[in-house]
Image (spheres, grey):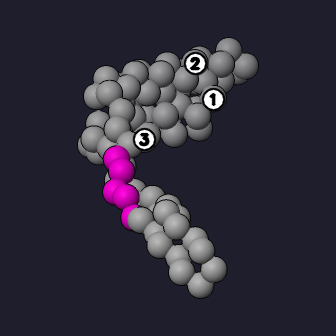
């Protein structure tokens, strides 16, 4: 559980730093025999700013739950 928590914390900080991810989508518009026309469209995938905070809080809870479990075993 600790590893999952660390991963969530890292992803949460990345989500807070980055507002979104830009990517280019290539799409065929016309394809007739030897003629092919394609279109490149730039798109952005964004997420709400609070989702990074939620991921960080969930990661901290997983890390704490993992460390509590280790203490109970000993």
Return the residue at label 3: 10
**Residue 43 inside the magenta-drawn segment:** yes
Q: Is residue 49 left or right of residue 71?
A: left
Distance CA(mark 2)–CA(mark 3): 17 Å
Q: Which residue appears at 45% of the width and 59% of the height?
A: 25
Return the residue at label 2: 65
Instruction: Please state which of the two labelled residues, at mark 1 or mark 3, is closer to the viewer.
Output: 3
Question: What is the magenta range?
Answer: 40-44
SS state under label 3: helix
Q: Position of residue 15 (x, y in %)?
A: 35, 38
Q: Are marks 1 and 2 in contact (CB under 8 Å)?
A: yes
Residue located farthest toward the right when viewing the structure as drawn: 73
Q: Are marks 1 and 3 in contact (CB under 8 Å)?
A: no
Q: Position of residue 39 (x, y in %)?
A: 41, 65
Residue located farthest toward the front when viewing the structure as drawn: 32
Q: Position of residue 20 (x, y in %)?
A: 32, 44
Query: What label sits on residue 62 in the rendered view?
Result: none
SS state under label 1: loop
Q: Is residue 18 visible?
A: yes
Q: Are marks 2 and 3 in contact (CB under 8 Å)?
A: no
Looking at marks 2 and 3 on the same chain, the residue that comes earlier in the sequence is marked by 3
Q: Which residue appears at 70% of the width and 21% of the height?
A: 74
Return the residue at label 1: 1
The quadrant in which residue 56 appears is top left
């Amino acid at each position: 559980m600790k590893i999952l928590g660390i991963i969530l914390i890292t992803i949460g900080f990345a989500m807070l730093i980055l507002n979104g991810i830009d990517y280019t989508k290539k799409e065929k518009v016309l394809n007739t025999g030897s003629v092919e026309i394609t279109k490149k469209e730039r798109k952005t995938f964004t997420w709400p700013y609070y989702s990074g905070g939620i991921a960080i809080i969930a990661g901290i809870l997983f890390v704490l739950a993992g460390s509590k479990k280790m203490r109970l075993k000993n």
